Amino acid sequence: MAKLVIKGKNIDVTPALKDYISKKLSKLDKYSQHIVEIVVEMHVEKNPRISHSQVVDVNIYANGAVLRAEEASHDMYASIDVVLDKLDRQMTKYEEKKVRNRTGKLKLTESMADNETYEDVKEDEYSTY
């Protein structure tokens, strides 16, 4: 698993919360070859007018990309569930994009191999005069 950083603002990060986050992040283990670091920030809004005060913000630093998701709700555990579902979708999209781009480059090199070389074109030019 990649480096995991769990931070809390206006909230005590309990061992139960840490275990819950680690358990939920195990869902992203299938993408572990791309993930370098995961930063989870949890905070509670002090303003009483904000109804969804339990906020979770997760940043995933992958090879050449940063994936970010944020969710706010009444319960910290519910916020964690939703934000990790969002990140799973983002990682799937990222993985598909990498595969799609990789196969596109292979097709380009194969098509270049089928084309005439510079020497073939040069010989044709001299033979037509």
Image (tube, rainbow, N blue to C red):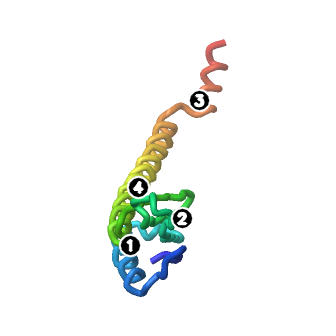
N-terminal-most mark, 1 or 4: 1
Please name the amino acid that badge 1 sits on: Leu
Question: In the image, is 78 to the left or to the right of 54?
Answer: left
Please report contact status of discs 4 and 3: CB closer than 8 Å, yes or no: no
Neighbours of disc 4 within 10 Å: few (<14), some (14-19), many (20+): some
Question: In the image, is 120 to the left or to the right of 35?
Answer: right
Please name the amino acid that badge 3 sits on: Asp
Which residue is the extreme one toward the bottom?
15
Residue at label 1? 25
Image mark for residue 120: 3
Residue at label 4? 90
At 40% from the left edge and 59% from the top edge, which residue is drawn?
51
Mark in the foreground, 2 or 3:
2
Which residue is the extreme one toward the top?
129
Quote the CA–CA distance across marks 4 and 3.
Answer: 47 Å
The quadrant of the rendering that contains the C terminus is top right
N-terminal-most mark, 4 or 3: 4
SS type, badge 3:
helix
At 33% from the left edge and 67% from the top edge, which residue is drawn?
78
SS type, badge 2:
strand
SS type, badge 4:
helix
Residue at label 2? 61
Q: Nearer the viewer, residue 34 or 24?
A: 24
